[in-house]
Image: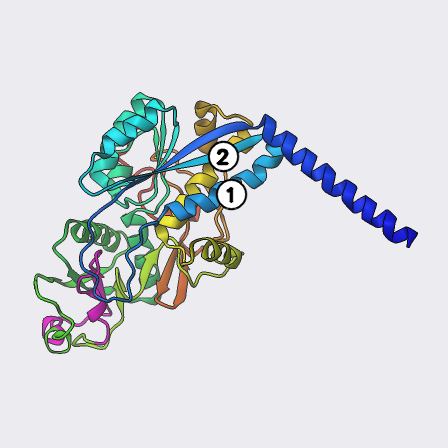
Amino acid sequence: MRHILLILRFIGYIACSIACFSSSVYADNLAVDMAFLTEKMSHPAALSNLDPVLSDAGVQGAILATKDNNTTGMFTGHHYELKRVDVLVGEDVVSEFNQLVADGYQYVVADVQTVTLKKLSVIAKANNVLLFNVSSTDGELRNESCSTNTFHIIPSDEMKADALAQLMLKKRWTKWFLVKGTDHEDLRFTKAIKRSAARFGIKLVEEKTWSFDHDARRTAQAEIPVFTQGADYDVMLVADVKGLFGEYLTMNTWRPRPVIGTQGLVPTAWHRTHERWGAVQMQNRFYKQAGRWMNDIDYSAWLAVRAIGEAVTRSNSVQLDDVKKFMLSDQFSLAGFKGVKLTFRQWNQQLRQPILLAMPRAIVSVLPHKEFLHPRTYLDTLGYDEPESTCRL
């Protein structure tokens, strides 16, 4: 009985010590204030009622990362706060961003469209604010429209297209039939695909534009076989970012060929079936918090907030200039559940990371493979390498 009482007293002492330590740490914590800025966009009608329209994409990843940062912050004397700002469709994103700047926010995670990010980048540079792009995949933002105070977390269209091209080259499926939509995002992805095809010696044997304005759900079996007649090919590549027709190509094409691109085998930063390198615990924690699976923007937002936390912790500074300098240094790295350390490219501030090639319910491969050699890191075989970049920071 005496031994039991001693053990209970010891446990009580330890619990009290932890509580006192935690309270004293939080009392002396240095605050790191971050904001998550979302530009709400109008969405086209979903092809299926099974596809939910998410109102919290991105911010859930940022919330989870803030919790992770504060776990470390208990011992480093830093406390992270995240402010959520949603700008409704048609409202002024720039004025909301200016208000964040006026309120003293120096770290802003931005889920906005390309044209908006260009405007915000000018303001961020003028006011010494760091922007973290977690949704726009436009290669222009990493090249002629790059900005010294904007970091790009989500992979670019070119990185995704290169990942597809590398796997197709490895399989020797080098003859592509391209079907593209007419939307601006479709044309942008098409441009990235053509760049990758030329880069890896792949031939586009046929190219067609899907210009039908009717619902293909009831006519796919009759129209798509006729539409996809033409030259022989190894794979059908589709550029349909909004998902207006691409889902109906699989199993309806004239020739029995795989479908890749924005539908079929899809290049993505994150996928709910990804389980390697400890990703399961990340998937479970996110699902418990959000009640849904993590998507690309959630993952990119998580990485953005974790990058801030990692740089603050390891540079031992909350000063923005010190944080930015450390992020671009050789000492910075980020664990992203992808088997390698993630770092920023100094020439355009894009986060290096592997690309997952996924089917709806399975991961097919993780690119790049190590046989794609590079003098710096094989991750730089995806997207614009330094000699190819037109970014001048």
Q: Residue at x 14, y 58 (%)?
A: 181
Does 239 appear in magenta?
A: yes
Is the Cβ of the residue at disc 1 closer than 8 Å to that at disc 2? no
- Which residue bears the numbered disc 2? 80
Q: What residue type is labelled 2?
A: Tyr
Residue 234's image quarter? bottom left
Where's residue 68, x and y in %?
52, 43
Element at label 1: helix
Please provide the residue range marked out in magenta. Answer: 224-251
Quarter that holds the N terminus: bottom right
Where's residue 365, x and y in %?
41, 62
Where's residue 193, x and y in %?
23, 54
Q: Can residue 253 be seen in this view?
A: yes
- Left or right of residue 211, residue 166 in this image: right
- Left or right of residue 332, residue 192 in this image: left
Does 241 appear in magenta?
A: yes
Quarter that holds the C terminus: top left
Residue 16's image quarter? top right
Q: Which amino acid does label 1 sit on?
A: Lys
Q: Residue at x 42, y 38 (%)?
A: 344
Residue 164 higher or lower than 30, as above or below? below
Q: Is residue 374 visible?
A: no
Q: How crowded is mark 1: few (under 14 residues within 10 Å), some or many (20 or more)?
A: some
Q: Residue at x 49, y 61 (%)?
A: 275
Residue 342 higher or lower than 105, as above or below? below
Name the one closer to the observer, 41 or 226.
Answer: 41
For the residues marked 1 and 2, what is the alpha-carbon distance in whole angstroms? 8 Å
Name the one closer to the observer, 266 or 97.
Answer: 97
- Which residue bears the numbered disc 1? 67
